[in-house]
Image (tube, rainbow, N blue to C red):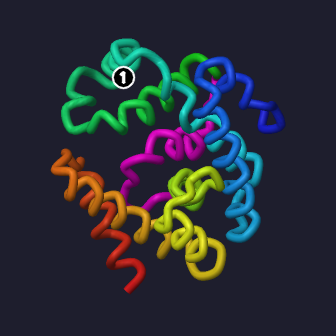
């Protein structure tokens, strides 16, 4: 695959203006985090560029992509908010030609996380939470942690915020999210 290619063109064609502007912010944050933590800047740019590529795609199309590739059971434990990360992973692989497993995993795991995420996965997970368009106090706190303390602590902070918000709203939380939370709690002790 071509690591110098501008993959933003795919996302720009597929999402609305608001989502595209969010994507630009994630790219900016991901590059900054890759620079701080010694990550591959090109991989961070590509994964950030494509992390929401299917976000505005029709839900039935997304579900078809997932079940066709991963089987019908693949969506059983996925909350609605994570569907696009799995369909985006498949779209990037099957239609854009991304064959770098670390980039693909960063796209797939940017919403739910997973235990033992790679550096790139953590960068995209946090960059999505802290990009400049996100103006909540929690995003600002997480950015401060990410830029000045520890990427692992930033992942844990972000996942704690997500779990708290979903719990308060009485919404479904995927088991992998709890596993990820527990993993990072142990890691940052």
Residue lying at 40% horizontally and 53% vertically, measured from the top left: 113
Q: Residues within 10 Å of mark 1 (few under 14, many from 20)?
A: many
The quarter of the image holding the N terminus is top right
Viewer-proximal residue among 96 and 178: 178
Side (left or right) of 9 relative to 75: right
Chain part drawn in magenta: 97-118
Residue lying at 59% horizontally and 42% vertically, measured from the top left: 103
**Magenta part mainly helix, strand or loop?**
loop
Residue 31: x percent and y percent?
Answer: 73, 55
Q: Which residue is mark 1?
A: 66
Side (left or right) of 118 relative to 175: right
Residue 171: x percent and y percent?
Answer: 20, 46
Which image quadrant for residue 48? top right
Describe the element under mark 1 as helix, strand or loop: helix
Q: Residue furthest bottom?
A: 189
Q: Residue furthest left?
A: 170
The quarter of the image holding the C terminus is bottom left
Q: Is residue 94 above or below residue 138?
A: above
Viewer-proximal residue among 134 and 122: 134
Any magenta on residue 108?
Answer: yes
Residue 49: x percent and y percent?
Answer: 66, 37
Residue lying at 56% horizontally and 38% vertically, measured from the top left: 51
Residue 137: x percent and y percent?
Answer: 49, 67
């Amino acid at each position: 695959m071509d690591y110098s290619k501008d993959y933003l063109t795919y996302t720009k064609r597929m999402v609305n203006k608001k989502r595209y502007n969010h994507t630009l912010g994630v790219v900016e944050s991901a590059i900054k985090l890759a620079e701080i933590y010694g990550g591959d800047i090109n991989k961070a740019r590509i994964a950030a560029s494509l992390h929401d590529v299917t976000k505005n795609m029709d839900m039935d199309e997304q579900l078809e992509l997932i079940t066709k590739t991963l089987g019908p059971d693949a969506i059983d434990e996925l909350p609605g908010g994570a569907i696009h990360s799995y369909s985006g992973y498949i779209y990037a692989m099957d239609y854009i030609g991304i064959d770098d497993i670390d980039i693909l995993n960063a796209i797939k795991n940017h919403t739910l996380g997973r235990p033992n995420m790679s550096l790139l996965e953590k960068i995209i997970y946090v960059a999505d939470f802290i990009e400049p368009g996100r103006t909540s106090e929690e995003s600002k706190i997480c950015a401060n942690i990410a830029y000045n303390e520890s990427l692992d602590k930033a992942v844990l902070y972000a996942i704690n915020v997500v779990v708290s918000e979903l719990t308060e709203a009485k919404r479904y939380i995927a088991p992998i999210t709890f596993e990820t939370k527990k993993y990072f709690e142990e890691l940052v002790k």
